[in-house]
Image (cartoon, rainbow, N blue to C red):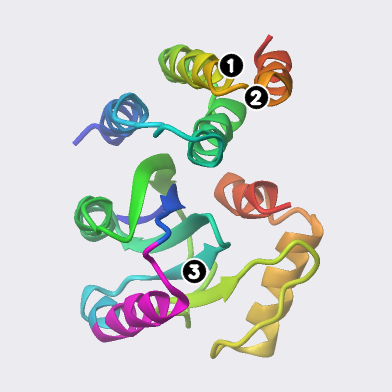
Amino acid sequence: MDIAKEELERKIKDIEAIEFGNNVDDVSSSLLIVMTLFEVDDHPEVIKACKYKLFEGISLLKKLGDDAKAREIENKIK
Amino acid sequence: MLSHLVYVSVRKKECTDEEIDKILAACKRNNPKLDITGVLLYSNTHFLQYLEGDYKEISGLYEKIKSDERHKNVVLITTGQIKERSFPSWEMGAKKINEDKIEFQTDLSKEEAKTFQDIIAGKDQEGNRSIQLIKKFFK
């Protein structure tokens, strides 16, 4: 039983399955989830999956008109 | 193998405080049989749950939790082996987290309450990363 491998696969699957929704509150709530993992995990594949999902959320925030929040998150991942 | 597992999720609007009471009641009913302990923290918008127990049991429970309709976007934060339980007397302790303070309304020893307060106050708990996450997520 390779727990580390299972953990990695689960994390990536969980991140990829995130659906942001269509309003600023829902997008922000879900972005916090992704950001939590992004900030605490150091595996390159997890970071890559988180960044991809974060950029998806950032793009949505911009479309919804919340540029300030989008920029705040962009600055955290640069 | 004794392990821990931490996940975070988005609380759905339909999940009232009464629904959370039901979650806790189910935990108290089911977790002792599986020898699972832990703590559920929740705000108006999020859940963070810390589980301890045999790896297979908490792993199986996590998959069930993921399908619960009261939350969404469930993400595993960490899992791994532990030497001892951090919350041995909590079949599932829980607390709603506000911005300012945390009050306990669950059964636990004074020592465990102090441990938890120390965690939230930012005092290091022997480098246990998952415990650090609890305070980090809700600060």
**Residue at horizontal 52 percent and vertical 72 percent from the top:** B87
Label 3 amino acid? Answer: Val
Q: Percent position (x, y) of residue B44?
A: 56, 62
Q: Percent position (x, y) of residue A32?
A: 57, 37
When asked about the image quadrant of residue B114, the answer is: bottom right
Q: Percent position (x, y) of residue A27?
A: 50, 33
Chain ID of residue with mark 2: A
Within 10 angstroms of label 2, few (less than 14), some, or many (20 or more) residues? Answer: some
User: Which residue is disc 3 drawn over?
Assistant: B39
Label annotation for residue A62:
1
Chain ID of residue with mark 1: A
- Determine if the magenta segment contains residue A73: no
Are the residues flagged by discs 1 and 2 in contact, CB closer than 8 Å? yes
Question: Quick one: SS at disc 2?
Answer: loop
Which residue is at the front of the view, B102 or B30?
Answer: B102
- Tell me the magenta residue range: B14-29
Question: Quick one: SS at disc 3?
Answer: strand
Within 10 angstroms of label 1, few (less than 14), some, or many (20 or more) residues? Answer: some
**Residue at horizontal 34 percent and vertical 75 percent from the top:** B23
Within 10 angstroms of label 3, few (less than 14), some, or many (20 or more) residues? Answer: many
State whether discs 1 and 2 lie on one chain. yes
Classify residue A72 as left or right of residue A59: right
Which residue is at the front of the view, B13 or B60?
Answer: B13
Q: Distance between the residues labelled 1 and 2?
A: 5 Å
Disc 1 vs disc 3: which is toward the camera? 1
Chain ID of residue with mark 3: B
User: Which residue is disc 2 drawn over?
Assistant: A66
Compared with B125, B74 (above or below) is: above
**Residue at horizontal 40 percent and vertical 63 percent from the top:** B52
Label 2 amino acid? Answer: Asp
